[in-house]
Image (cartoon, helix red, strand yellow):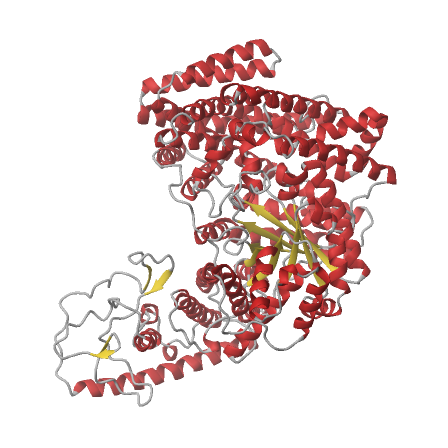
Amino acid sequence: MTDTTDDIAEEISFQNFDDDCRLLGSLLNEVLQREVGTQIMEKVEKNRILAQSACTMRIAGIENMAELLEKQLASEISKMTLEEALTLARAFSHYLNLMGIAETHHRVRKQRNMQLLSRSCEDVFSQLLQSGVPSDELYNTVCKQEVEIVLTAHPTQINRRTLQYKHIRIAHLLDYNDRSDLSLEDREMLIEDLVREITSIWQTDELRRHRPTPVDEARAGLNIVEQSLWKAVPHYLRRVSNALKKHTGRPLPLTCTPIKFGSWMGGDRDGNPNVTAKVTRDVSLLSRWMAIDLYIREVDTLRFELSMNRCSDRLSKLAHEIQEQENSCEDRHESWNQSLSRSHSKQPASALPRQLPARADQPSLSVCNDDGSEYPRLELPGTDYMPLNSQDGQAVSKPVSNGTPSSPGASQSSPFSRSPTFASSQLLAQRKLFAESQIGRSSFQKLLEPSAPHRPGIAPYRIVLGNVKEKLVKTRRRLELLLEDLPCEYDSWDYYETSDQLLEPLIICYESLQSCGSGVLADGRLADLIRRVATFGMVLMKLDLRQESGRHAETLDAITAYLDMGTYSEWDEEKRLEFLTRELKGKRPLVPQSIEVAPDVKEVLDTFRVAAELGSDSLGAYVISMASNASDVLAVELLQKDARLAVSGELGRPCPGGTLRVVPLFETVKDLRGAGSVIRKLLSIDWYREHIIKNHNGHQEVMVGYSDSGKDAGRFTAAWELYKAQEDVVAACNEYGIKVTLFHGRGGSVGRGGGPTYLAIQSQPPGSVMGTLRSTEQGEMVQAKFGLPQTAVRQLEIYTTAVLLATLRPPLPPREEKWRNLMEEISKISCQNYRSTVYENPEFIAYFNEATPQAELGFLNIGSRPSRRKSSTGIGHLRAIPWVFAWTQNRLVLPAWLGVGAGLKGVCEKGHTEDLKTIYKEWPFFQCTLDLVEMVLGKADIPIAKYYDEVLVSDSRRELGSELRKEFLTTEKYVLVVSGHEKLSQNNRSLRRLIENRLPYLNPMNLLQVEILKRLRCDDDNRALRDALLITINGIAAGMRNTG
């Protein structure tokens, strides 16, 4: 009976989804009729009907008729003019994007209408308590949980940010459309708004014409925080707190946050020469600026809300102190103004101005693009003002221009215009003095508010929060000056440096409200702000740095050669460790200030210098990609220590914050196999072990990479090697009594370790998730998971409950040694099959380039970094993202399944089929691995992949394509045998239905892409053809719902 009810509920839910798709589709058709005309639209509709009919026939199993219809569709497309092809590509691409918006809204609506969401805090807390977990243990585990979601700039987000915003607006309109209380007029207005948004989307260029800079990418990450996470985090924490209170009797502590955020945007320099030390510094400051700006907005709103007078003695005392301080400041300024008035009264009065000065209508803080600046800039005065002499308080008698006295006849610029140069340090100092003086920056807001002596009854909360806002504004102004490399010697008590400083007055306000019986007010907007400060701190997202191990070795080569010590990279591992340990124990800097090095080496040294200047208050971890030895970690520790010694010597005080965590990233199969040994070697070194205990609270962080291991050995072998590597790393840390945090470098697609978050965490080795976890979220998955507040809340909750379950009820290990032996056998056969195809077949690279749009992906301008680590045509140096992206486009999705079928077949043919079925039912890791492969097989399309081969691949290489398609069918067969499913996606009917809904628009996009590739490869300079190709790439990515 329950199943029937669930089926009916699912049908009703899908009916609403279909209604949304029909609404958006009809409005798009309406817009297109107006924009491109009836004649072209008739051709577009004809192609849609042919595709729809072919899909219906194929789903019904009538293959012959489906093939005939697909051939007719391909014939129609081949006859199209370029203009018609471009219109078809754009129309279907936009429809797939609109369908994606409807899908996301469908999921949100489904969650909203369910009384108890599976995997929610309410659900999981109840399960754990019923299974025997004591309530105190549950409470403490949730409060101590440390999960960090790291947003990266990996280039897999196809859509321009402009279009993403428009898509979000449509999602909000769909949400509004669900309201039952809308009048007829309301619905008509809503439809008009949707038409406007869709028209705007159609008239917007969907292609990026320029490659984004690392700062652009970082800004996109900050926008995700502003548009979604800023709203989602308090909602999520409130949900956790309410569930805890219901099940344990205690709410979540106010400053406790189980999830925080990190970023690689502006810090990931691995293979990306565009990420420089200056970029990292600027992005970190920009992140701080955004955090402060968001806090100012919240405090402003809070001041309006907390208008009451009743408060605690502590708050009253604080408000009184602030008032007295303001009074003394105002008295001092009044005295100053009077002395100035007396000095000016001796001069003839100047005539009143007849017009406002230039830019009087603009705020003092505005974004200036006239000089190409990309940061908010403080408007500073011109060169003819009269700054005060710091020694005697008198006005300087002669105005200054460019650092030299001006002649009486020199023309003077407006006091509020920008000077032509910033070259003179004297002029910079004068501008800074003017900008910071009370005369130079009269506050319009203070003119509106009564002065302190005339407001005896003002609410104490408003006084305290007003002071908080004033310090936040000064903090923001200081950051603006730092971003523009202007002097900004603020007194440390004038601005906020740490989140504790900002939290202190907020918590005093909170405790005051609670003590006065106003807990309902305390637990509202004020509690949300405190929780935001606890989660986002002063930087929103701490920035990780990442660099390849080889670059550090090159840097040490330059240093050891300069010091006549030999060549570091030529030493064996033991000699390197001896040298590094000796230098780390020493107290003198290693790198001489006089050293001259190559630009690449200087960039590495500059990065460590910036890291020393910013410290762990702004930065997170230093990740070493392609790590393979203990010396790779100690090399970074030494370079970090050296930079901190140099910077603290120049500052005359310790560097801000602590040292960065140094995190080895094990990526290739070889490095994964050696990961445990590397960690054991590191922890056996006394200096390193003591350093971890003293500076990092006895915590070792290790990162494992899913992308390169998958490209190296195939998905199955990579998954198994990752599992074993995590087991070994955990065991190594346990041997030395060190806690471990595993950092998972997952991509969006299954081929790069992607997949449902909950499944991924639940299938980790026992003991690898002990209340701590770091994981990357990349490219299009950032927008998909966190682009809307509703979806973000759900994702954060899933992270929390999955980690909680993996900590308190760890997944089962392999039940017997035989299971491990079978996994080794599958992995061995799978890896051999994969590598013999990808790396050992001499025809494979040429086939890959012909059968996919890999070579053309570079024109997309979707990321700031190159698609290859080195200038080589081999698969080895091709990044994992374009590798997966290209195979997703032709619908073969080869990286996610190649080798899996061969491995399963080999073991089944040896008589172990029943064993594998048992393993699938009882071992979460194996089940998750196979379920993800099954999901990918369901999204692939063999007839489409075959069509790419028939049209684009040379006759001599088509046999390779045929073999790959046979391998696909083998994989499908044995995945179904082991899982016990009759057909693909049997256990996920919703996903199957959503995929089938996209096919009438997705399949024609593939056929169109083949036709455009065919024409473009004969006319590769045709920009219009290239644009059409890129639009098909966008559309297919939207239809497949992931890229790389």
Q: Position of residue 438 (x, y in %)?
A: 33, 77
Residue 491 higher or lower than 907, as above or below: below
Residue 32 appears in view: yes
Residue at the image point whose x is 62% and y is 45% from the top: 746
Residue 452 higher or lower than 938, as above or below: below
Residue 117 appears in view: no
Residue 972 higher or lower than 213, as above or below: above
Residue situated in front as seen by the camera: 741 or 176: 741
Residue situated in front as seen by the camera: 625 or 617: 625
Q: Position of residue 575 (x, y in %)?
A: 71, 65
Residue 985 higher or lower than 756, as above or below: above
Residue situated in front as seen by the camera: 858 or 27: 858
Q: In screen coordinates, is 1002 left or right of 258?
A: left
Q: Position of residue 542 (x, y in %)?
A: 55, 59
Q: Position of residue 938 (x, y in %)?
A: 63, 26
Q: Quadrant of the N terminus?
A: top right
Q: In screen coordinates, is 801 left or right of 454?
A: right
Tell how many labels: 0
Q: Quadrant of the C terminus?
A: top right
Residue at the image point whose x is 59% and y is 75% from the top: 589
Q: Residue 342 appears in which quarter of the rendering?
A: bottom left
Q: Residue 207 appears in which quarter of the rendering?
A: top left
Residue situated in front as seen by the camera: 246 or 776: 776
